[in-house]
Amino acid sequence: MQDVGVFVQQWPTILGCDVAGVVHGVGALLSARFKKGNRVIGHVINLVSGRPQDGAFALYSVVSGDKVAILSDAISFKDVPFALEAAVCVLSPKQPGTAMPNISAPALGLPYPLLEPPSIIKTLMVYGGSSPVGSMTTQLAMAACISVIAVASEKNFDLCRSCGEFEVFDYHDEVH
């Protein structure tokens, strides 16, 4: 990357994008939302921001308020999902951005969870239903009373069903 200037334009730079830790300090605009000592997860990426200091592989990271979320005490740092950026970006109420152009908030366009059954039943197809993003999308859709049809490999059917998928198809199967 350094020799040909691909992705990283300035050196030194801090790589990495997934962060989890304890808040050390909070900017004035976010002081109502975050406090020193909060346990958080987030996403930083210098490849998008262009700022070499925006990376995760450091003792401290600076995370934009729209890319960080408070982590419940019920979830240990060890058990935090592998795809933190997916959770934060999907759930973050934000305008379309560089990472997901033309997609506005909520990023997947799913309605918020419902307490009563909807008047119209909707269906969502999730290609890659067993992936971290697919699993999370399924659970969010199910909470919003949207039935989910997943496409995954046969070995992952049980995982898909455990997330709530109504029906699962093997992506190896031919379409007739």
Image (cartoon, rainbow, N blue to C red):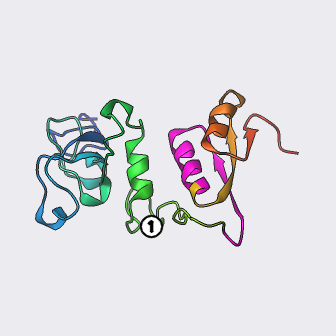
Q: Residue at x 17, y 36 (%)?
A: 58
Percent position of residue 67, x then y = 31, 55
Q: Is residue 36 above or below residue 112?
A: above
Magenta segment includes 140: yes
Q: Indicate left or right for 171 with 20 as reference.
A: right
Using the rendered view, name the quadrant where residue 158 is placed.
Answer: top right
Residue closest to the far right: 176
Q: What's the magenta region?
A: 118-142
Percent position of residue 27, x then y = 12, 60
Which quadrant would the N terminus be assigned to in this image? top left
Residue closest to the far bottom: 119
Percent position of residue 12, x then y = 14, 38
Q: Is residue 113 above or below residue 12?
A: below
- The image shows a total of numbered marks equal to 1
Q: Residue at x 46, y 64 (%)?
A: 106
Residue that label 1 marks: 105
